[in-house]
Every structure is written in C-alpha cells, then in structure tokens.
Amino acid sequence: EGLALYENTNDTGYLILSSQGNSSFKIYQREGNNKFIKTISSLHVKNTDGIAATNTKIEPKYPNGLFACHNSKGKNFMIYNWDKFFGDFITKSK
C-alpha cells in the first residue's frame, strides 16, 4: 500500500514497503539487487495506508530521521524515531 525511501549518507539506503492487509513493513536494500533485509510488524498500527521516511536530523528526538505511517485504526499518523523503530533490525551506516 505504500513505498518509502530512506537514504543513508554513504549512497546506500533502504526501500520500505508497507502491506495494508497485515500491517507489516518489508525492508530492502536500496542499492544493487535490492536484497531483502527484514519484515517488521507493529502492534500499534492497523491497516496502514501510506508511509514516509527521512534521514533528516530533527533534534533532539530524531537525530537520524524518522519513519511515519498512517494508522487506520486510530485515524492518525504514527511517527517513530528511525533508530528506535528499526534499530534492532537494521544497522545504520554513518
């Protein structure tokens, strides 16, 4: 249901795809053959209907950017610190 691009500062990054049906996010490398990295599911998001990501530093809460997704359950947007939401799954290259 959605596609976002997260760019690292070293010409690498991630493609993030959302699946509205099961409220999950699939992460792929941006470069090369787009190697699959991980699927992430969030208990707080239901029927996501759009996503966005940025590596822009927004101090102090988002030093490496953020990930945002629409949450149909609450009719709102969930905003996550990039490192906290994806940190256990992805090592950010600096």
Image (cartoon, rainbow, N blue to C red):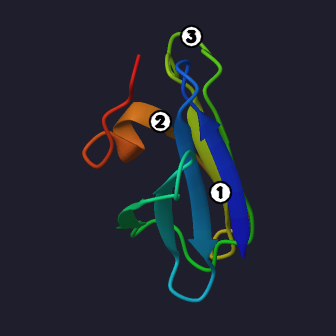
- Mark 3–mark 2 Cα distance, whole angstroms, equals 13 Å
Q: Secondary structure at mark 2?
A: helix
Q: Secondary structure at mark 3?
A: loop
Q: Are marks 3 and 1 in contact (CB under 8 Å)?
A: no
Residue 48 seen by the camera: yes
Instruction: Say which mark, if any, is on residue 59.
Output: 3
Q: Nearer the viewer, residue 58 or 73?
A: 58
Identify the residue at image location x=65%, y=72%.
48
In the picture, the quarter occupied by the C terminus is top left
Mark earlier in primary sequence (3, 2): 3
User: In the figure, is residue 68 to the left or right of 26?
Assistant: right
Mark earlier in primary sequence (2, 1): 1
Where in the figure is residue 31, as x and y percent of width and height?
Answer: 56, 45
Q: Secondary structure at mark 1?
A: strand
Query: Is 86 located above or below residue 40 in the figure?
Result: above
Mark earlier in primary sequence (3, 1): 3
Mark in front: 3 vs 2: 2
Residue 77 seen by the camera: no
Instruction: Say which mark, if any, is on residue 77.
Output: none
Query: Is 42 located above or below residue 8 in the figure?
Result: below
Which residue is identified by label 2? Answer: 82
Which residue is identified by label 1? Answer: 69
Q: Amino acid at mark 2?
A: Trp
Pointer 3 local density, CA inside 10 Å: few below 14, some 14–19, many at least 20: few
Where in the figure is residue 80, as x and y percent of width and height?
Answer: 51, 42
Where in the figure is residue 30, as x and y percent of width and height?
Answer: 57, 47
Identify the residue at image location x=52%, y=58%.
33
- Mark 3–mark 1 Cα distance, whole angstroms, equals 20 Å
In the picture, the quarter occupied by the N terminus is bottom right
Pointer 1 local density, CA inside 10 Å: few below 14, some 14–19, many at least 20: many
Q: Amino acid at mark 3?
A: Glu
